[in-house]
Amino acid sequence: MPAAPCLQVALPLPLPRLFDYLPPAGVEATPALVGQRVRVPFGPRELVGVVAAIGTPEPGVELRQAHALPDPEPLLAGELLDSLRWLARYTHAAPGEVFATALPASLRAGEPLPDTHAWAWQATEAGASGRTGLRKGSRPRRLAELLAAGPVDEDRLEQELEGWRAAARALAGRGHAERVAVPASTLAPAPQPGPLPNDEQRAAIDAIAANTGFTPFLLEGVTGSGKTEVYLQAIADCLARGRQALVLVPEIGLTPQTLARFRARLGVPVHALHSGLADGERARVWAAAWRGEARVVVGTRSAVFLPLPDAGLIVVDEEHDASYKQQDGIRYHARDFALVRARALGVPVLLGSATPSLETLHNARAGRYIHLRLRRRAGEARPPAVRIVDVRKRPLQAGLAPETLHMIEAALHDGGQVLVFKNRRGYAPVLLCHDCGWSAQCPRCSTPAQGTPLTVHAGGGRLVCHHCGHRQPRPLACPACASLALQPQGVGTERLEELLAERFAQWPVLRFDRGTTARRDGLAKLLAELGDRPGILVGTQILAKGHDLPRLTRVVVVGVDEGLFSSDFRAGEKLAQLLVQVAGRAGRAQRPGEVWWQTHHPDHRLLHDLIGGGYDRFADDELAQRQAAGFPPFAHLALLRAEATQAEAATALLQAARTLLGEAATRAAPGTTAAAPVELLGPLTAPMPRRAGRYRMQLLLSSASRPALHARLDAVLPAIHALPEARRARWSLDVDPVDLY
């Protein structure tokens, strides 16, 4: 008699296999259970996994019984389940870890799928009678008047009253208002009219509307050309067809601005999904998408895993941004996975950027994507003028040349705003002894051969490692020679802020970096604080992406040289994108913009390519160099990383892996995919050899054939998992790495 079928469960463990269990008592193992969460015993613990398949147990093996199935129907089903299986195969990751990554934390823990509803505020009895006691014209009074007619949902409050959240907290503190759950909106979309599109925008909108099946688009538009308006019109068309739209943005900081604009225009609730939300909020958005109630979702990288039962459009804004690549755990790329899902769902996917990644640009030029271009700025705005400032042999104050300081002063007197961009937070990157040359180095990341400097923070009072997070107070005297001549060297955003606030005391100087924008809505609050007043914004790349600052007329880039010379083959691309994006913040309204790039290498080819021919000329040159060197997009990479407290353990693991990879090539049948050339480079010390107390090594695989690369990995990864060296070192595989550090 054949054995009864069993559940093959994917558990959230770094093990590339499924685990067999008997179904819970009274439940029959049928294909209808695939995709459901299941509670199972695992050793002394209970884990929550996902039923990946129905199988037959091996003869003579006694299986344990699953405890329970928390859901009446699968949470992962259809297209989403198939796409996640594809992702597990492509990244060569454990299926259980991939499924867990796709679920919010509360669902991974086995909590029930939450109810989905909207939130509204209503006046209490005390609030109805106490409204007149509030100061006239104040936000709490205006909010109380809005609530007098009945509950008002938060989406409407967002549109009608700026700063309503603080006002709501004030009323709630007095007992005058309370937050209540209301049914999710079922109203038909009522989009508001937007500005009249120009000819280029109109052509892009029409092209997207004409393709309702899977069609990848690259919307390449200069900064300020109105890409967001194209997104809005495409989404409005999607909503009119009764479909869902997913919009991916690279940073949390872009979410509030995008949400506000989308809510004002689309006439439907717009949901947000990002790491700044509490676990419960993330689960509710996920559940609303799963039920088809969330018609528009704006989210960061992890939003690409949302269920989309009525999908109609996927938008990836700033598609070139490296933050779409997950750098730990399951190393997926949200942009690439969005393309996979769009194909499976049969919907258009719109990739937008002023500086497309070279992989995306190559695909568009090869005809794989429809290439839409916006070559001029929207409205009356004109592209900013760019000036290279040669700072060789010039006296610098916190990295700023004298003429740069004069330009800043003139712009402020003219009523404009100035962005001083420095992509390094902190006060200074190095603390140096002027007498003996000692420098402060991270004890957890430095090696005898290569030190990792601690960054000076808090006006010089604290030392922080930006790689491992190590912190220590600044020493009062040099530990090597006891000298008191300890000097911060170099420039960070804190030092720039200090100098500019001292020199331009009559104007506001606001710093935008991880230290000032870490709190929820921190970026939006700082921008609101500045408003339309003349002032100076000192910031890192947080300000380089997608922000519309109509009063900004001048941009200064400090430290261009730091990106001109690097061992990373993508360094030139990253710098070009950053320079163009930062420059694009200037002159986006009626006032003309001007951008100053300070450099010690004014004749560098990259800078002159950007000024003389824009990003297109740079891309032409860079793609030609990539092709000659055999780098992506003309080759496909995979990176095996290993780290251990002893360098020898990491080296031994990668050396054993290299041997296995070589043996797999010799065993492969001639002429097959598995026998195609795969170049192996390493094991080599990582560019940063030690981090957080662990030595780091890497082995790079490269092939002109993507199938050949994956075939080689498929052939050897089970053997690598079984290596005794694999138990003495941490290791990971990164397919299509964007960072070789």
Image (spheres, rainbow, N blue to C red):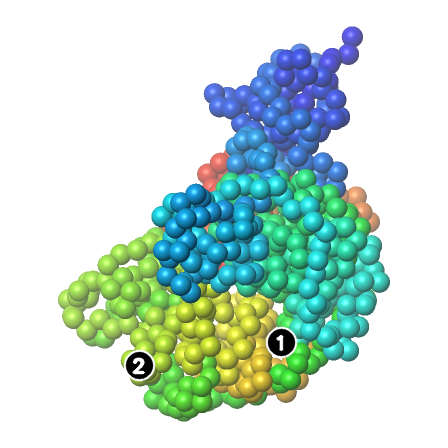
The answer to whether residue 210 is above or below residue 497 is above
Camera-side residue of 660 and 117: 117
Q: Residue furthest top?
A: 1
Q: Sequence order check: which comes first, mark 2 or mark 1?
A: 1
Please give the name of the residue rendered at 37% of the width and 75% of the height, measured from the top-left corner.
509
| Residue 568 shows in the view | yes
Please give the name of the residue rendered at 50% of the width and 52% of the height, measured from the top-left corner.
147
Please give the name of the residue rendered at 48% of the width and 56% of the height, measured from the top-left corner.
145
| Residue 52 shows in the view | no
Number of the label disc, if any, that sits on residue 224: 1
* Residue for badge 2: 505
**Label 2 sits on what residue type?**
Ala
The answer to whether residue 604 is above or below residue 369 is below
Camera-side residue of 358 and 193: 193
The answer to whether residue 241 is above or below residue 601 is above
**Label 1 sits on what residue type?**
Gly
Relative image position of residue 184 (x, y in whole percent)? 63, 43
